[in-house]
Amino acid sequence: MKLYNTMSKRKEEFVPLEEGKVKMYVCGPTVYNFIHIGNARPMIVFDTVRRYFEYKGYEVNFVSNFTDVDDKIIKKAIEEGVTAEEISKRYIAECKKDMEGMNIKPATKNPLATEEICGMVDMIQTLIEKGYAYEKNGTVYYRTRKFKEYGKLSHKNLDDLQSGGRSLLVTGEDEKEDSLDFVLWKPKKEGEPAWQSPWGEGRPGWHIECSEMSKKYLGEQIDIHAGGEDLVFPHHENEIAQSEAANGKEFAKYWLHNAFLNIDNRKMSKSLGNFFTVREISEKYDLQILRFFMLSAHYRSPLNFSADLMEAAKSGLDRIVTAAENLRFLKENTTRREMSEIEKDAYAKTQEFVDGFEKAMDDDFNTADAIASVFELVKYINTTANASCSAEYLACLLDRLAVLTDVLGIITDKKKEVLDEEIEALIAERQAARKERNFARADEIRDMLLAKGIILEDTREGVKWKRA
Ligand code: AMP
Ligand code: ZN
């Protein structure tokens, strides 16, 4: 299995640090608004990467943070006259609903930056002790030039950066020893959230958050660190400088970056204002279609969002779902049970589509080609499955299709989306949360079920549910 490593700028064979296991960290969103469909691209892409590793038999420890302390969150809180915490909690809950709709598997852990401040302070202390950081009037800076390999991920040259950096000195950071130095800890400003530290009250810089959370939940060395390509510099470059200086080890073996989702061939971003939120798209399309659209291109190619491409994704997905529904219908209605010798041969032929799928995914997760193999399988199903086939043959075809679509995170059985037992388990969890007066969790579960078309009704006899 080969993956493109931004560090070496080439495709490399994947060799895990520990046999059969993958430790993976994906930089998550800053939560000050609904996520836009650009933010959804890394979520969908790296969830698919995770699913493929699992398909291959790896146990994946998948950690993805929420950046819940940041200037933009504070600004939004001031605008609304509420706390920063209220803003971040609200948009984390909304983001989780969107992720659910896009069938993103829950991470092993979603750490919140604000809950990990102690560890960040410790890491900054270590950097100071080792001479990689220094404090000036309550601000702690990283001494960039001390880290000899700085620039190795983004392939930037320190002197070029220096000449560009001089004019870019941020006000309030003029006490830096060097314009290349970046902030690890910043002092409190009036009205902002702040935590105690040896350098006075303040809050961490963005880069140290990921270095610490990755270390705490995955260890000092990880297999894969991922995010959008805008994070290569400075975010990931700075994470490497921090983690490798503090831990004395190579941080991540493979660095994966998705290209941008554009709109009208321009980068989609909150600052440019040319974005659609996932929620807006969900009013028009099933989010499965958005997922399928994202996977129709290779993750390292720029992808332009357009109504035409979404319509193409919709009809492509329809073809797959219809084939699956057809198989289910035939299976229920056929009178023959066991596979004939001819059917055994016919089924054996489908292995070539699985091989094609794996070959594409083994080549740096080429989902576009993998989808082409799924379409070939669909075509084969449509030409060979009919009312005279055995139930066993039809079930095998269905299973073959489901295994591949599951890697892509595409659900072909709408009815099976939420099983009755899952609903009952979630209702029980909601009751327990209410008992503990954790109403936020209780509401979150109700909304989660609602997003899946399950309506809860609190009655005197207990909770009743129905499908919308
Ligand atoms: P942010 O909330 O801006 O930190 O972004 C969260 C994640 O979304 C990061 O991995 C970004 O690189 C990624 N991202 C933001 N905008 C886009 C876009 N238009 N296309 C693809 N990825 C994006
Ligand atoms: Zn990060």
Image: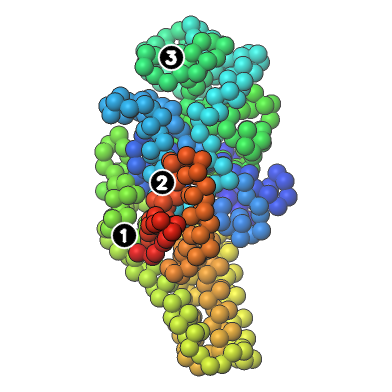
Point out which mark residue 285 bears: 1
Depth check, front residue: 466 or 66: 466
Q: Along the polypeptide, which appears first: circle 1 or circle 2? A: 1
The residue beneath circle 2 is 443
Q: Along the polypeptide, which appears first: circle 3 or circle 1? A: 3
Q: Is residue 422 above or below residue 93?
A: below
Q: Residue furthest right?
A: 19
Instruction: Give the Cα separation between the discs numbered 3 and 1.
Output: 44 Å
The residue located at (52%, 70%) in the rendering is: 402
Residue type, numbered disc 3: Lys
Residue type, numbered disc 2: Asp
Q: Is residue 83 above or below residue 332?
A: above
Q: Is residue 228 left or right of residue 25?
A: left
Q: Along the polypeptide, which appears first: circle 3 or circle 2? A: 3
Residue 345 visible somewhere in the drawing:
no
Residue 17: horizontal and vertical position, in percent? 70, 44
Mark 1 vs mark 2: in front:
2
* Secondary structure state at the residue bearing disc 1: loop
Q: Quadrant of residue 150?
A: top right
Residue type, numbered disc 1: Tyr
Point out which mark residue 188 bears: 3
Q: Is residue 195 left or right of residue 23?
A: left
The residue located at (36%, 17%) in the rendering is: 191
Q: Bin the neighbour count of mark 1 within 10 Å (Cα to Cα): few under 14, some 14-19, many 20 and up.
A: some
